[in-house]
Image (spheres, grey):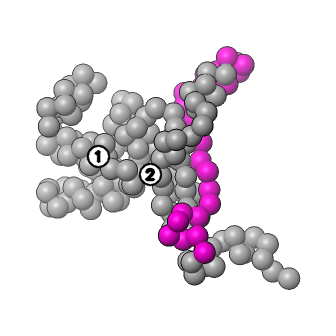
């Protein structure tokens, strides 16, 4: 895909088939994959690629501003090629992560307000909403959740 090659070159990154595939997988995914998931997908095309290579590539794409990384809890990091400030919904049961595209307020306004009122340099914001996705809401998966451990005893 020419667009990805041009984008990588514009950022000053060397274009390799592996780097191009890794970025394509992340930019086309709405699932906010982990580095491990990206590795499993890349291995289908490049069976000899190491996890370390995939991880370093993902981190370099993040450092160059092409990805955002966020912690969904318990040190599980997900990646998103949509680097504009936007909220995510994280399911407490299955771990599913969705963009909240129809969020009523502009998150960028919050970032600008925070930056204008703080002596700190704000680089990014992570806004996460936690709850249960439609598949887990009311299902038996919800019963096994940590929420039960946090206050469900008599």
Position in image of residue 6 (x %, y %): 19, 26
Give the residue at x 62% y 56%.
130
Residue 40, placed above or below residue 60? below
Q: Does any portion of residue 63 appear in the rendered image?
A: no
Q: Quadrant of residue 36?
A: bottom left
* Magenta part of the chain: 114-138
Position in image of residue 19 (x %, y %): 21, 41
Q: Is residue 125 left or right of residue 79?
A: right
Position in image of residue 115 (x %, y %): 64, 21
Give the residue at x 67% y 17%.
116
**72 and 113: which is toward the camera:** 113
**65 and 133: which is toward the camera:** 133
For the N terminus, the image quarter is top left
Residue 113, placed above or below residue 101? above
Separation of residues labelled 1 and 2 (CA atoms):
14 Å
Mark sitting on residue 78 = 2
Q: Is residue 145 left or right of residue 68?
A: right
Residue 76 lies within the magenta run: no
Q: Quadrant of residue 60?
A: top left
For the C terminus, the image quarter is bottom right
Give SS at disc 2.
Answer: strand
Instruction: Name the mark nearer the viewer: 1 or 2.
Output: 1
Give SS at disc 1.
Answer: helix
Residue 127 lies within the magenta run: yes
Position in image of residue 141 (x %, y %): 56, 77
Q: Is residue 71 left or right of residue 54?
A: right
Give the residue at mark 1. Answer: 28
Give the residue at x 59% y 47%.
128
Residue 29, placed above or below residue 93? above
Q: Does any portion of residue 82 appear in the rendered image?
A: yes
Q: Categorize mark 1 by other alpha carbons within 10 Å: few (<14), some (14-19), many (20+).
A: few
């Amino acid at each position: 895909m020419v667009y990805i090659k041009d984008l990588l070159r514009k950022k000053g990154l060397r274009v390799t088939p592996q780097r191009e595939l890794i970025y394509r997988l992340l930019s086309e995914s709405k699932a906010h994959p982990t580095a491990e998931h990206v590795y499993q997908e890349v291995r289908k095309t490049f069976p000899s690629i190491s996890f370390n290579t995939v991880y370093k590539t993902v981190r370099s794409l993040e450092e160059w501003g092409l990805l955002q990384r966020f912690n969904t809890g318990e040190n599980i990091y997900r990646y998103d090629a949509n680097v504009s400030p936007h909220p995510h919904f994280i399911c407490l049961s299955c771990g599913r992560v969705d963009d909240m595209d129809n969020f009523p307020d502009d998150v960028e306004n919050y970032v600008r307000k925070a930056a204008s009122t703080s002596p700190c340099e704000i680089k990014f914001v992570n806004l996460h909403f936690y709850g249960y996705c439609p598949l887990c809401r009311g299902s038996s998966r919800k019963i096994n959740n940590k929420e039960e451990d946090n206050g469900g005893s008599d």
